[in-house]
Image (cartoon, helix red, strand yellow):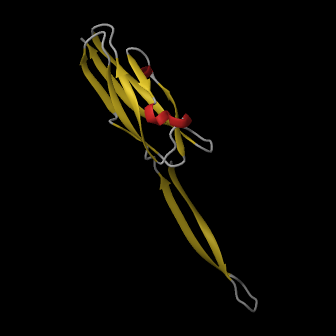
Amino acid sequence: VGGASGTTNVFECPIIGGTCLPITITVSGSGVVQAVANPSSVDFGGVPTGTTATRTVTLTVDAGYRTEVASGSGLNAPFAFNFSTCGAGGGFTGPGTCTIDESFAPTAAGVASGTTNVFECPIIGGTCIAIPIAVTGNGT
């Protein structure tokens, strides 16, 4: 992710000897992350205590990356998390989309909130990228 630039020099040389002439090509580009959660936040609204509400979230995973780990308060009670199709075969490999399931099972009345971070990690090594999903619900 981020910008990069450089130059390539191709040399044109005379057939019968002499000095080669450089042809300089400047290149630049910017890497972008396509990873996204849809929706990026889940509001369960009012959920009666002792019941569970579940919502499906679609993740877009970048080429060369795999979903394989998650963290955050959205994994812990009263919330729960399931990798669903994003965990198939040890992790979904992009490019493409997969799904996760977020659940809310309140045991008491009141508002709860958290964040689930699903990480896409490079297949060949490097830094993982978090895909955050905000979760909220109200136990009734």
* 45 up-or-down from 107: above or below: below
Q: How many marks?
A: 0
Residue at the spot 44% in from the left edge and 26% down from the top edge = 82
Look at 32% across and 28% down and name the residue there.
55
Point out residue 113 in the picture as x, y percentages from the top left corner: 34, 19
Is residue 38 or residue 128 the one in the foreground?
38
- Between residues 69 and 117, which one lies in front from this camera angle? 69
Q: Residue furthest top?
A: 108
- Image quadrant of residue 6? bottom right
Quadrant in the picture for residue 126 = top right
Q: Give the position of the C terminus as an image quadrant.
A: top left
The residue sitting at the bottom extreme is 16
Q: Residue furthest right?
A: 17
Q: Is residue 66 left or right of residue 45?
A: right
- Residue 100 in percent (x, y) is at 41, 32
Q: Nearer the viewer, residue 31 or 55?
A: 55
Q: Residue at x 54, y 56 (%)?
A: 4
Considering depth in this image, is 109 or 33 the residue closer to the camera?
Answer: 109
- Left or right of 19 on screen, residue 91: left
Give the quarter of the image for residue 43: top left
Q: x and y percent of residue 27 in the render? A: 54, 65
Q: Position of residue 52 (x, y in %)?
A: 32, 17
Against 33, is 53 above or below? above
Question: In the image, is residue 94 above or below residue 99?
Answer: below
